[in-house]
Image: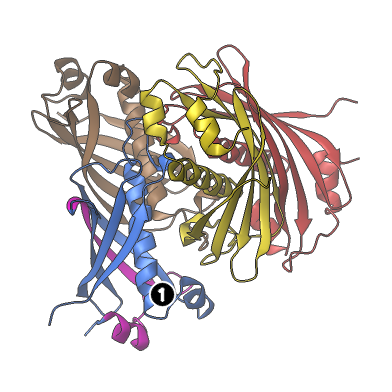
Chain colours: A red, B blue, C brown, D yellow
Amino acid sequence: MAAEVFESFHKVRPFECDYYGHVNNAIYLNYLEFARMEVLEKKGFTLTELKHSGLLLVIRRIDITYKWPALAHDQLVIRTVLKEHRRVGATFHQEILRRSDEKLLAEADVAWVVVNPAGRPVAVPEAMRRALGMG
Amino acid sequence: MAAEVFESFHKVRPFECDYYGHVNNAIYLNYLEFARMEVLEKKGFTLTELKHSGLLLVIRRIDITYKWPALAHDQLVIRTVLKEHRRVGATFHQEILRRSDEKLLAEADVAWVVVNPAGRPVAVPEAMRRALGMG
Amino acid sequence: MAAEVFESFHKVRPFECDYYGHVNNAIYLNYLEFARMEVLEKKGFTLTELKHSGLLLVIRRIDITYKWPALAHDQLVIRTVLKEHRRVGATFHQEILRRSDEKLLAEADVAWVVVNPAGRPVAVPEAMRRALGMG
Amino acid sequence: MAAEVFESFHKVRPFECDYYGHVNNAIYLNYLEFARMEVLEKKGFTLTELKHSGLLLVIRRIDITYKWPALAHDQLVIRTVLKEHRRVGATFHQEILRRSDEKLLAEADVAWVVVNPAGRPVAVPEAMRRALGMG
């Protein structure tokens, strides 16, 4: 069964561009994070609530490939899909495309785990597993 | 008696520049905040410890004038001096200068208050008053 | 005749919050800039085109008052209105409100001028004057 | 022959921390970029000069692993070393450590290429090859 694809939208803001006129490489990670937060929210979770229940989502690894620069005023779509999952976390595959022509600007694998306040990985809560399609 | 002047140093990083090649206007506020933190630390306070003791320093107003753009690789000095103080807070005057020629790039008045976790202004702790020269 | 009020919308992203859980004071300037860019675009101008025609919009002064913190996930509206204008620039008044209850979180006066590549103020182009209602 | 190791230093600024109190994942990319710029500068190059000569350094891929969170006020060292090189670019290996105990907080492989203004990869200039030890 195909995994659910989530879409988030963003229009590039001039201050996100560096002195090359391109969106700075670090800003793409802001876009990816924003899109992941939207996935969680659409599924009924917020980081704030998770934190109150003593759980943090932390990023373990990001492997991002930059294919084509995003420029000021570009309309972007960020697509997020579950790629793999483990007991304590999962990996999302995320793509950033230009909406006008669906050109792929960047893609990334983002691995995250759930940890307790001591920083120790713990099992992903069952409600979250179900919501995100983690088998 | 002249107020104590604190100096902080920063070299402009390329990603802080926007697509005009100038440091973006919002980044100057990062510089000012960084310099204020250094003042507190030099005087023996950290925001983390203050937070643990139930106090937050929050900004009430910033009035900043941009005189000349900071550019990538510029060496900057940020000067911070106490300008006024009240029971629950104070105003710092801060200047950002280019080190090579002492040219004034920006200056700001930054008013802050101490609040409790409910967001209610409370008296500045006595130790902090003394450390910052708040009469 | 009442000045035109422009509205921009933004939902606070978690990474915009600092370790107090509040939107960091510098991020508000990103919001204000983003809203000003939207005003220009709605009126048919982009910073990129202006730059190609040899003109830059630069900020001279920002006087911002922080009234109430914006928090992660808050839905915001940024209202921008022309307050004053001069031959070489103008001042916008901008307000940031929480959409759920129209609470005013911050307000600012932002003064800007048009400069040529040498950084010298020049007259605001007539088309821009007309578009922004600059008398 | 062992490759040269470059060191850059940074003290975490409170506004770089997100609402978990950790340095946000995107900010690590700012640290890595800042360290790479320092390597270039130590070797006599600046991005501004390269741009004037019609060349841009662009990032193709970043593979970063987050091992342990950096916190406000942490003193960091960023170590940069040439890992691989090709005709049109190279890959740096970069590590971010906490200075107090040399704990490895994050490490990354960063692949970059030199492009002309049209975005087409071109040979790394000979002077830069020599300076960076690219065989």
**Magenta residues?**
B103-132
- Most distant residue in the top direction: A101
Image position, residue C91 (x, y; %):
18, 38
Instruction: Mark 1: give few (<14), some (14-19) or many (20+) Cα within 10 Å.
Output: few
Q: Image quadrant for the N terminus of chain C?
A: top left
Q: Is there any visible trace of residue B49 in the rendered image?
A: yes
Image position, residue D70 (x, y; %):
60, 61
Q: Quadrant of residue C80?
A: top left
Q: Amino acid at mark 1?
A: Glu
Q: Is there any visible trace of residue A11 in the rendered image?
A: no
Whether residue C45 sits left or right of residue B104 in the image: it is right
- Total marks placed: 1
Whether residue D108 sits left or right of residue B22 in the image: it is right
Q: Quadrant of residue C95?
A: top left
Q: What residue did someone put label 1 on?
A: B41
Q: Residue at x 79, y 64 (%)?
A: A120
Is residue D66 within the magenta segment? no
Q: Quick one: D35 or B26, which is closer to the camera?
A: D35
Q: Quick one: C133 or B110, which is closer to the camera?
A: B110
Image position, residue D33 (x, y; %):
52, 43
**Residue B129 vertical position relative to residue A11 in the rendered view, above or below:** below
Image position, residue B53 (x, y; %):
50, 81
Q: Quick one: A110 or A3, which is closer to the camera?
A: A110
Mark 1 belongs to which subunit? B
Q: Image quadrant for the C terminus of chain C?
A: top left
Q: Quadrant of residue B36?
A: bottom left
